[in-house]
Image (cartoon, grey):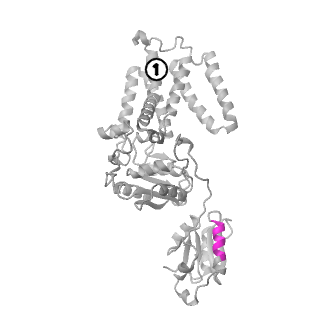
């Protein structure tokens, strides 16, 4: 226990040197009397629970007074303080970081300092996330409060092996980041990698929280594929922790980062595990087929419509009878990009106007555009079907990436024909197979091929059947049976 200040005046001057004297209204240094002696309180107004603080100050003024002889040892404050979350602090930098995170500093007349955790962050209550809804299942979701998020995970995993390792990143932002893992299930190699990357972050702040952290941790640069899985559901996070994955909880973000992950993790959904195994497998297959068609349907239809002379008679109906004055490739590109513009417009449109905007878009783009000859009916049909298939992808990041690759394959097909179509697919496969975030093959277990693991990707096995932890997690103990 170290003595940080020579007096209360010294502590107040230090605080003002950091925040200025009345330069910011929320940084508060207030002298009060505790058990008849003066003490200096340091805190950020708005990040502390005012009711608890008032109750504590009242009790320390009217409650049991410590014996005078006990005050020679600064530890007496820990003994008599009427609150459980109190600890001493031995560095001024730690005191500053704790105050900025919402804790209250108690500076005693002899210069010793204690920190009380009376944080009360502003935020909303847990509610079901919009992007991961289920028919049956829990309706709670992560919030912007890191303390609430850790509690939601702890509620589902009542075990002493669950660890929340707190770190602070960036120079100015000092964002709280909790590395969450199951001791004995998570790989120490992966944990060391994340800790090292966190220590290497020297940026001034993570304003975009988890997404900014992803780019710093994995050097994503201009790679379009998501290297981590984001989830707002505590049950999904807990399930991955039991498998040996690592969760990274960032304060002020309602999304939790899960690593390591593959492309098949982005195609999973909680609904598959809320249904019977057979139904869950059916839902999974529908989703996998839908994701594949969202990528290939539009370029493949364009290929068939362009080379109708090679089609058998049974498929002669494919392709427009009158392609119109606008080239078919241009129609597809305009319509596909137009669907994305409509999605953006729907997000930024106030809720009462969303329905009206949808009606206008359907009439103008759907019917009028066909009547004036800008689009053919089949173009609208296949673009709309491709968009619906894209919406079936659970991961928003992967769905956007799928649209980009669809346009890429479509353009190659338009330039080179059939060779361009297959060349685009080959290039995409090679690119995905070459990705190894955290040393994990992105297409595992398809590349490299692990038959048993691949069966579990395609089939939702009953929970009663033993399933070892995935190989990619490098878990010290892969057996999940106790």
Q: Nearer the viewer, residue 79 or 196?
A: 79
Q: Tell me where residue 30 sits by quadrant.
A: bottom right
Residue 214, visible in the rendered structure: no
Q: Position of residue 295 (x, y in %)?
A: 45, 29
Which residue shows up at 54% across the image and 21% down it?
381
**Residue in the picture at 55% in, 86% down:** 71
Q: Report the predominant secondary structure element of the magenta stretch.
A: helix
Residue 115 counted in the magenta span = no
Residue on which the image places disc 1: 301
Residue occupying the point 38% across, 29% down: 425
Where is residue 183 drawn, in percent x and y? 37, 59
- Which residue does the image show at 69% across and 69% down from the upper left? 22
Q: Which residues are magenta?
A: 49-58
Left or right: 40, with 471 as reference point: right
Q: Looking at this view, is 153 or 229 the one in front? A: 153
Asked if residue 141 can be seen in this view, the reply is yes
Say above or below: 150 vs 412. below
Residue 51 highlighted magenta (yes or no): yes
């Amino acid at each position: 226990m170290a003595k940080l200040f020579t007096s209360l005046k010294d502590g107040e001057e230090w605080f003002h040197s950091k925040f200025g004297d009345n330069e910011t209204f929320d940084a508060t240094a207030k002298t009060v009397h505790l058990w008849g002696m003066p003490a200096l309180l340091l805190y950020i107004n708005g990040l502390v629970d005012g009711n608890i603080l008032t109750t504590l100050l009242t009790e320390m003024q009217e409650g049991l007074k410590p014996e005078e002889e006990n005050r020679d040892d600064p530890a007496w404050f820990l003994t008599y303080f009427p609150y459980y979350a109190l600890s001493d602090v031995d560095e001024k930098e730690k005191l500053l970081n704790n105050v900025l995170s919402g804790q209250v500093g108690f500076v005693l007349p002899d210069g010793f300092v204690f920190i009380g955790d009376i944080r009360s962050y502003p935020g909303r209550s847990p509610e079901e996330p919009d992007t991961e809804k289920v028919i049956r299942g829990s309706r709670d979701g992560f919030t912007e409060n890191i303390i609430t998020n850790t509690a939601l995970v702890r509620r589902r995993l009542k075990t002493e092996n669950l660890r929340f390792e707190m770190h602070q990143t960036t120079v100015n932002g000092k964002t709280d980041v909790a590395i969450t893992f199951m001791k004995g299930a998570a790989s120490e190699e992966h944990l060391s990698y994340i800790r090292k990357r966190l220590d290497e972050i020297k940026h001034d702040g993570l304003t975009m929280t988890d997404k900014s952290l992803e780019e710093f941790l994995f050097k994503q640069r201009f790679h379009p594929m998501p290297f981590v899985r984001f989830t707002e559901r505590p049950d999904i996070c807990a399930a991955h922790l039991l498998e040996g994955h690592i969760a990274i909880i960032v304060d002020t973000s309602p999304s939790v980062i899960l690593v390591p992950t593959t492309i098949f993790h982005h195609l999973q959904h909680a609904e598959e595990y809320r249904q019977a195994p057979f139904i869950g497998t059916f839902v999974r297959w529908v989703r996998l087929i839908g994701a594949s068609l969202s990528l290939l349907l539009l370029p493949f239809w364009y290929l068939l419509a362009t080379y109708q002379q090679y089609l058998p008679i049974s498929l002669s109906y494919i392709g427009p009878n009158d392609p119109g004055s606008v080239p078919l490739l241009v129609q597809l590109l305009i319509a596909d990009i137009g669907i994305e513009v409509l999605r953006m417009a729907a997000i930024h449109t106030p809720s009462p106007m969303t329905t009206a905007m949808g009606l206008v878009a359907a009439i103008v783009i759907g019917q009028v555009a066909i009547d004036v000859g800008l689009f053919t009916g089949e173009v609208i049909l296949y673009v709309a079907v491709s968009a619906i298939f894209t919406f079936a992808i659970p991961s928003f990041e992967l769905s956007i990436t799928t649209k980009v690759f669809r346009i890429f394959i479509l353009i190659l097909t338009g330039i080179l024909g059939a060779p361009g179509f297959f060349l685009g697919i080959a290039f995409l496969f090679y690119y995905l197979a070459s990705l190894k975030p955290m040393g994990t093959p992105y297409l595992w277990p398809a590349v490299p091929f692990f038959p048993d693991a691949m069966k579990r990707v395609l089939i939702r096995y009953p929970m009663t059947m033993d399933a070892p932890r995935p190989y990619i997690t490098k878990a010290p103990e892969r057996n999940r049976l106790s």
